[in-house]
Amino acid sequence: MLKAKSLFLLLIAATTGLTGFAQDGGRKIISLNDQWEFNKENGPVERVDLPHTWNDKDVLDDAPGYYRGLGIYKRKLKLDESVKGKAVFLVFNGVAQEAEVLVNGRSAAKHIGSYTRFIVPISAYLNYKDDVIEVRANNRFNEDIPPLTADFTFFGGLYRNVSLLIANPVHFSQKDHGSSGVFITTPQVSALAASVQVKSTIDNTLAAQKVQVITTIFDAKGSVVNKQTSAVTIHKNENKTIIQDIKSVQKPELWSPENPYLYRVVTQIVDVKTNAVIDQVANPLGFRWFRFDAAKGFFLNDKPLKIIGASRHQDYENRGNATPDALQIRDIELLKAMGGNFLRVAHYPQDPQILEACDRLGILASVEIPVVNTITETEAFTSNCLNMQTEMIRQHFNHPSVIIWAYMNEILLRLKFSNDKARQQVYFTHVRELAQKLDSLTRKLDPSRYTLLVNHGAWDIYNKVGLTKIPMIVGWNLYSGWYSGVPEDFGKFLDRHHKELPNTPFMVTEYGADADPRIRSFSPIRFDKSVEYGLKFNQVYLNAMLSRPFVAGGIAWNLADFNSETREETMPHINNKGLLTIGRQPKDTYFLYQAYLLGQPYLKITSAAWQDRTGIADSAALTSTQPVQIATNLKSAELFVNGKSLGIKDAVDHLIDWQVPFANGKNQLRVVSGDQNDQAEIHFQLQPFTFNDNRVPFKNINILLGAKRFYIDDQEHQVWIPGQPYKPGAWGWIGGEPYKGTNNRITYGSDKNILGTGNDPVYQTQQVNIKQFKFDVPDGEYDLALYFAELVGGETKEALAYNLDNNHKKEVEEQRVFDVSINGTAFLPKLNLAADFGYTTAVKKTTRITVQNGSGISIDFKPIAGKPLLNAIQLRKIY
Ligand code: GCB
């Protein structure tokens, strides 16, 4: 009852002003997420709530780039006289990326960097009547602020929570890099006893005062475990640090992924005269110890623990980086439910909710600053890096989940000065010096954790520049079998590290393959973006890491798909290496991880999400045979299709494959193992083997050319199947070969963004030099659609730096003009895709056809200049 009443009072206070509510630990924190006015520089004003970004929409369109400039936020602040004399602060959890805070038109603070908190004291600027706060945020390119380039989108805005903090004149310091002002360490910890040290800094903006600093440790049930009181006199404008060595906690309950036991440390400043609590801060405390061993891997509380987890970006489908708290927390729950025990907070510090969730759920973590791909050799850049590292460490210091601080990612990916070797050496020296400074700073600020520097797989250069010697742990981002080579090379790299750097512990800080959930293949190959290739890739990697004890851990890239503006590919502007989609739907790979990692019995039809399938009937049969896969940690399982058993099969590396004869219409799949089972319903559209088979009447078919993949268009609910060479009585192409791409990378179709469509995969493959396409359909009325896109030529864009094997040469444009006729009648005479529609632009041409006298449909392609082509074709029988 009492609780409800004080909440009510608080609400009243929040809406009417800020007077008259009960003291709660001496400080008040009130969210300022509502009632903002926003405009881009010279743009119209709109009402917005936080979290907010101005880039959530403009990253979705075909146009390259997004607004990088100034955004202005304004809000009224209703404070009255009772707040006078208090210490008032604005707390910004993250503003991208440069910020200036003005109060009543006067500049109160500036901050650099998108990913860390900053706290602005504003008492000196307030009039306590009609105060106005203004935040000028800017996400322009600034060569002195990391990240400079990276494979993610640099959204701008007031994209994390903002709050007002009203404290008494004596309060825990808000001056230390956005931290709570209280730092907790456990100098000695074992299963028998743990010592705790609490270092708190206090500020006083008024007259000298005698106070007590009281630290209380509560266990998870709320009982007091230990308490310590220190008497302190704090003078006006003094900034005083108090160290409390707290009596050992006997037989502490240890923190670990399987038992993330948290204690709570409450530190108070108490007025000696009145006994009133003047200020109060709470922090989590977990008792654990850990070590990395170059030969034996990672140990937590003296027990070996293989680190397996994922990296995470902070953005979300249609929201950019303005992701609400609940969705942030849910990501960590999804990682836990996958069986993961580690989060790489990449490539920058994230919302405070993330590490709080890791503490609570038992996920170990590393956190890093966004020094990615390249550096600027200026003092300003160096000092911004050092400041970010300090802010990160100070702000996230008390989380038991954090075991590693990192500071550079693939810093030699974009090699500067390749044409001037002497200058390049100077650059390398600067990179090494910056790494050394960041590493030393980290060890000084926090000797209790490990340092990590993350490289890409270019072994020689990182060793030559000396970057493998600086950190306590080396991280390798490895993509054999994706950007280059084959997945099996991965294990060789691991063995090489162990042989050549036998004393340096390491982790695989990234590995992954794009998997577009709309793309499926029965013969998956590198770069086809199929879910099946991604699955195979992850299986090889997991096996290689799990079988080598010296590999401390592996961190999948990435937990979820994320925005990356410069990417094109099947889903432009999105990196598809997530185990979850950008809207956090699980992909098959997520189920594979569950099968590998979960302790309890697990059985799952991985491709259950591929609900709408189509396929050609097996010759003379009324079924079409296609694979179905199951992920499990059980020995074997039995599959039933429409109630009929397909027998029991053993799992190989947690997967079982079945060849399933699908019938037209609904198919019930049920897999059983002991008392575990899983089910799926697949809607199958059977395509006739030949059109004269009356048992399978033809309805419609959607065919991709030059492709070995299926594409599921989830917007128009159409399923596309790979084409085939012409078969008499049925359908197919005659002449030509699949489009091979224009660089020497073994590529799959084109990875260019196709303009004017969301169905890019329909247009990214094609049959070049095609002569004819035939459907031997019976007489009747048909709708036919032909799909084209000119894939060669247009602007030569800079090759994506991540495509390591990529050699984007200037494309030799080809004159291409051809005639298309249907059953001998001209349909698209002198078609010139580039001239008439533009490069990489979706072109769809439809027509109604009457088929009579048993002629079927034949579409002829006649070259006038260059080679004719066809990307996709669609036929529907009307009657
Ligand atoms: C990397 C980068 C990461 C990219 C990833 C990829 O090595 O560290 O930022 O997103 O590769 O998908 O290419």
Image: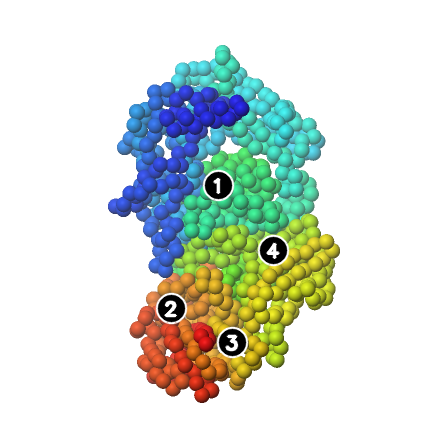
Q: Earlier in the sequence, mark 1 or mark 3?
A: 1
**Amino acid bearing label 4:** Phe
In the image, 473 versus 253, the foreground residue is 253
Q: Give the labeled residue for mark 1.
A: 325
**Marks 2, 3: nearer the viewer:** 3
**Amino acid bearing label 2:** Ala
Q: Give the labeled residue for mark 2.
A: 842
**Amino acid bearing label 1:** Asp
The image quarter containing residue 629 is bottom right
Where does the image place residue 540, in percent across and percent down from the top left? 62, 61
Scheme of colours in the image: rainbow
Q: Which mark is residue 698?
A: 3
Residue 453 seen:
no
Where does the image place residue 7, in percent across and percent down from the top left? 48, 27
In the orientation shown, which residue stands out farthest toward the left?
42
Where does the image place residue 385, in percent across and percent down from the top left? 43, 43
Number of disc labels: 4
Question: Residue at left 42%, top 48%?
Answer: 319
Question: Residue at left 37%, top 73%?
Answer: 845
Where does the image place residue 335, in percent across and percent down from the top left? 57, 48
Q: Earlier in the sequence, mark 2 or mark 3?
A: 3
Secondary structure under badge 2?
Answer: loop
For the residues labelled 3 and 4, the Cα–Cα distance comes to 36 Å
Neighbour tally class for label 3: few under 14, some 14-19, many 20 plus, Cα within 10 Å: many
For the residues labelled 2 and 3, the Cα–Cα distance comes to 27 Å
Question: Residue at left 42%, top 51%?
Answer: 318
**Badges 1 and 3: C-beta atoms under 8 Å apart?**
no
Q: Earlier in the sequence, mark 2 or mark 1?
A: 1
Q: Give the labeled residue for mark 4.
A: 591
